[in-house]
Structures are given as C-alpha cells and as structure tokens.
Image (spheres, grey):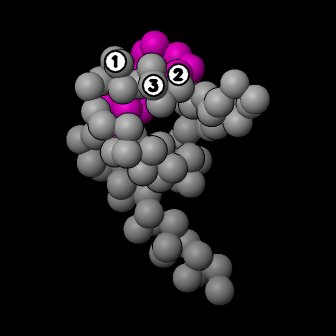
C-alpha cells in the first residue's frame, strides 16, 4: 500500500517540473505569501491554471495554504 501511495505522490509531484509550477513556486519563494488573485496579477496566468498548479504544489508539500475567512493564501512550505 505504501508503495502505491509513494508512486502516486511521485507522479503527482512531476507537476513541479512544469514551467508554470516553477514560475508559481519561484514567485512565492521570492515575493512571499499570495492569493490566487495576487499570483494572477504577478504572473499573468489564468486563475483556473493557477488553482490546478497550486493544488498540486500543496499536495506535494512544497506550498502551504491558509484557508482563512478572507480567502486562501499560499506560501512556500
């Protein structure tokens, strides 16, 4: 069972290799915490793309999300 989970996690984390995922992560690492709207303003990427990338980065453990009452804010883990 652990092998299957490990393989699934590795496949999911291959998303980090995408140019958009790298761009999102570097933006968070260099400029700090940001909402999806702030990332869209910084990077010019569509919100739908950013949500998918951020979900993958959170699942891989390299980005954390704070789901407060004012909306979700993302930061490097």
Q: Which mark is residue 34?
A: 2
Q: Give the residue furthest to the right.
A: 69
Q: What percent of the width, then of the height, locates residue 25?
A: 41, 32
Instruction: Give the Cα separation between the discs numbered 3 and 1.
Output: 9 Å
Q: Determine if residue 56 is in view.
A: yes
Give the residue at the far bottom of this rendering: 1
Q: Which mark is residue 42?
A: 1
Q: Give me the residue at 34% from left, 45% from top.
A: 49
22 vs 31, left or right, is left
- In this rendering, is residue 58 above or below 26? below
- In the image, which is nearer the foreground, mark 3 or mark 2? 3
Q: Residue furthest top?
A: 31
Q: Which residue is rendered at x = 63% and y = 33% of the image? A: 72
Precedes in sequence: disc 1 or disc 2: 2
Q: CA distance from mark 1 to mark 2?
A: 10 Å
Residue 51 placed where, x, y %?
A: 45, 44
The local secondary structure at tag 1 comes to helix
Residue extent of the magenta highlight: 21-34
Q: Which residue is mark 3?
A: 37
For label 2, the crowd category at 10 Å Cα-Cα, with few meaning under 14, some 14 to 19 and many 20 or more, is some
Q: Quadrant of the N terminus?
A: bottom right
Residue 10 located left or right of residue 17: right
Q: Is residue 57 magenta?
A: no
């Amino acid at each position: 069972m652990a092998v299957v989970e490990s393989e699934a996690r590795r496949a999911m984390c291959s998303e980090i290799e995408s140019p958009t995922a790298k761009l999102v992560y570097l933006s968070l690492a260099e400029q700090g915490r940001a909402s999806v709207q702030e990332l869209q303003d910084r990077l010019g990427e569509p919100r739908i793309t950013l949500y998918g990338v951020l979900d993958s980065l959170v699942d891989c453990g390299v980005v954390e999300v704070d789901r407060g009452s004012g909306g979700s804010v993302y930061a490097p883990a």
